[in-house]
Amino acid sequence: MSEKLEERLLDAALERLKTHPADGLSLRDIAREAGVSHQAPYVHFSGRRGFLAAVAGRGLARAAVEAAAAVEAAGDVPTDRLRALAHAYVGFVQTEPHLHDLAYGPLVDKADHPTLQAAAIDYWDLLHDCVGACQPHGTSEPETLRRCVTAWGTVYGIARLTAHHQVPSSVAAGLDAILDGALDSLTSGWLVTDGASPDPLGVTRS
């Protein structure tokens, strides 16, 4: 398959993902929209799973580029860069939830397509750089990695709760305020914990 036809298939699938969850995608419809045989996605991407992984990779690669641009635009202050990344990620979850779920869900593995694997690594490296820059001197690499997961899980959870309107109305704060407050708590906790024997949540205990 020519590169142009491959791009048409991937673009058609990404367009569908704007309104349809990945597990409900019809590859026959996607092929028809791209103007190719209904077998093309299966044959040229080694089956449905390989095709979906390629779609996820293309979309996640774009999201990673956009997130990196947001981080660079935030300047040189580490906490500002982390905040910019978090807001970019929340935007990704909210505007393209089906693409996000495909890239990070159970339908495909990162190893199913090289583009997806590379994009996931790029996004993780960006997170690692932003979180790492907020750590006090002497924080170990294993602890930095744990804090990356903590930050990611915190931002993801906030994004999901707000997207599904699960934040109680009694909470007198919008998404931005909740997100920034959570990040402030994390980064403040990182600065006062001992990197040699850290609290796994980045919060000190009395």
Image (tube, rainbow, N blue to C red):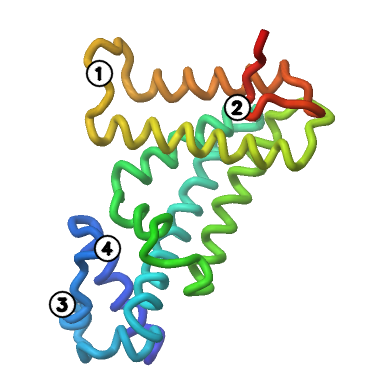
Say which of 115 and 102 sits in front.
Answer: 102
Q: Which mark is residue 168?
A: 1
Q: Is residue 68 left or right of residue 49?
A: right
Identified by mark 3, the residue type is Asp
- Residue behind mark 2: 201
Identify the element where label 1 is drawn. loop
Work out how far the residue at label 1 is from the one at label 3, CA to CA, in angstroms. 40 Å
Work out how far the residue at label 3 is from the one at label 2, CA to CA, in angstroms. 46 Å
Q: Position of residue 59 (x, y in %)?
A: 39, 61
Give neighbour class at mark 3: few <14, some 14-19, many 20+ (Cα, 10 Å): some
Identify the element where label 4 is drawn. helix
Identified by mark 4, the residue type is Ala
Q: Circles 4 and 1: CB distance less than 8 Å?
A: no
- Residue behind mark 4: 22
Mark 4 or mark 1: name the one nearer the start of the chain: 4
Q: Which mark is residue 29?
A: 3
Q: Position of residue 155 (x, y in %)?
A: 45, 34
Q: Position of residue 61 (x, y in %)?
A: 47, 60
Mark 4 or mark 2: name the one nearer the start of the chain: 4
Q: Circles 1 and 3: CB distance less than 8 Å?
A: no
